[in-house]
Amino acid sequence: MSIWRRLTDGVPARALGALGLLAALLVVAPFLLRFMSAGDYWLSILILVVYFSYIGQAWNIMMGFAGQLSLGHAIYLGLGGYVAAALYVNLGIGPWLGVFVAVAAAMLAGGLIGFLGFRFSLAGVYFALLTIAFAEFTRILFDHFKWVGGSGGLFLKVEADGSAFNLQGSPLLFYYVILALAAAVFVLCRWLLTSRLGYYWLAIREDPEAAQAAGINVLRTKLLAVLISAGLTAIGGVWSAFYYKSLFPESAFSMGRSIEVTLAPIIGGLGTLFGPIIGSALLVGLGDLFTSLAEWLANTWDVKTAGLKQIGYGIALLLIVMFRRDGVWPWLARRLGFDRQREDRP
Amino acid sequence: MSADPGQFVVTLLQAIAMGLLTGMVYGLMALGLSVIFGVMRVVNFAHGEMMVVGMYLAWLAFDRLGLDPLVSLPAVAAALFVFGYVLQRTVINPFIGLPEHMQFMLLLAVAILLVNACLAIAGPDTHGVQVDYMFDSFNIGPLVLDAVRVYAALAALVVAGLLWLFFTRTRPGKAIRAAADNHIGALVVGLDVRQLYALTFGIGAACVGAAGALMLLIVQVHPFLAIDYTLLAFVIVIVGGLGSMSGALAGGLLIGVSEAVAGVLLQPSLKSVFSFGLLIIVLLLRPQGLLARRS
């Protein structure tokens, strides 16, 4: 079977068409935004949407495909960002080379956490707590790691001769880099799901004991999920470090950063390819909506209350979780007729 | 750190004593988490946020009515009980038995709401209480124990004792334990399990609310403490054994002492290295907790 056949097998034509349209729209979006007022602002929002869908997709491999709940993905984001940024700042090694070291470092950390967790058969909340513990450990470590600036942080300077070769430039550059990454990880995830490894993951997610009985090497298969997820997340970390140009252990390895990673795929629909994308668009959109609303309240009615926008965000999140507990995408896909299992269902 | 070994031992003992006292309050906080998990298998990811709500309520009582947190404690606990009861009935009950990630997201939303409600009402500044006995202390040999910590620890012990009496001597307490042991069996003998679950969540919330009121005697409150307390409560219940009441108290003491000792031996910024190290070791080698029986 050709790669294309394999990737599109069983996907309704209208879903493929819609996907093509979405991709085309995302490619030309920056040019369309030029004609809008506050186009730069909307581009920065779009960058956030694509970024969170990318790291959500990477997290989804571990949780959505293989069923291993990680609440410590900040460790891979942070390690990725720190390694590439430190190599560049301290040794002058550019990010296109540094990203390989960053990925290796994150995979090493993921391998260690995964091996320990799975070897000692931790699952569910227990495994999640192990991932949190390691992320917190790393945070404290980096707080005292002087080579990367310690708790004072690590900064990337804006350089006059900055170019795409050292990942410096306009938001447009960062947009296309993260868009290319998101597209690549989307195709990769689809390919993984149609591979033997993908089926092994689903088997383990649904019933680890049955998977083991069927002869799957559960430890190795779960480890592969962690390694791939960690490596991909680290690439996102490198991108984010060069985009934001500063890193602090306090935020880079924080619990909040880890939670951020999990939001889009869970809200969008765990284990689905579109879940992270829809979830990210929805959450970034809601965040922006409530920010504007809080600003409007402050300007028009002089209501200046801290935390107001997060309260709105929290209520929205609560309602989505309560009424779409499997995520928004499975429901939306049924409504749009993109549900490929539709004909198979009794 | 002093060069004199005698002085060093006293400093260490002092830290251990302080850690034990703070640890009692930690234990009470973790007790709430453990009770909720032990009975309905729901991991309360909003636990630290509920703790902070308790702290703010106690601060409001002090600020507006001049009430000592030790006096307002029953009212704070009662308020958190009602909150927990209603929250369980309306929001959490449909999620019992569902996968962890769904419960996690649900309680995360609750956590965001609680923290930001505190932020909206009290602002981002830190608040503390100034009680008359703030600078009092008890001298036991060479050790100097802060009065606030001693009172907070004693009160935590009293609340934990009351809880123990409730679970062993009263009918609803026994019914909750029955429902925790055997869900189907409890339904068969005609217990109203939904009601018992709501009661349990209320009790867990009251526990952490009481712990919050007591903690306010020791530390100042600001909204962003919440996530640290959630993590701390998790570390404690895992170390003591998730679902075990005595384990939560013992875990609280252990973590309280380890934090205090780490503050003396290493530097204060490294104090949670001990607790997270302990968490990793316990998770790997004894996931049922140091005290709990293997199930």
Image: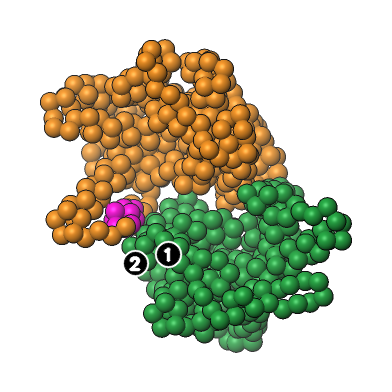
Chain colours: A orange, B green
Give the camera-side residue of A251 and B290.
A251
- Subunit bearing disc 2: B
Q: Is residue A138 magenta?
A: no
The quarter of the displayed image where residue A260 is located: top left
**Residue sitting at x 74%, y 68%:** B17
Crowding around mark 2 (Cα neighbors within 10 Å: few <14, some 14 to 19, many 20+) is few
**Quadrant position of residue A337:** top left
At x 37%, y 69%, the residue is B90
Tell me where residue A253 appears, x and y as whole percent. 53, 40
Q: Are marks 1 and 2 in contact (CB under 8 Å)?
A: no
On the same chain, marks 1 and 2? The answer is: yes
What residue is at 35 percent from the left and 23 percent from the top?
A174
| Mark 1 or 2, closer to the camera | 2
**Quick one: quadrant of the N terminus of chain A?**
top left
Residue at 65% x, 68% y is: B22
Percent x, y of residue A107: 59, 28
Judging by the rendered image, the residue that carries numbered circle 2 is B121
| Secondary structure of residue under mark 2 | helix
* The C terminus of chain A sits in image quarter: top left
Determine the image quadrant of residue A180: top left
Please, what secondary structure does the residue beneath circle 1 have?
A: helix
Query: Percent from the top left, x then y, of residue B278?
Result: 71, 52
Image mark for residue B92: 1
**The magenta stretch spans residue A312:** yes
Span colored in magenta:
A307-317
Q: Amino acid at mark 2?
A: Ile
Residue B97 appears in view: no
Front-most of residues A257 and B183: A257
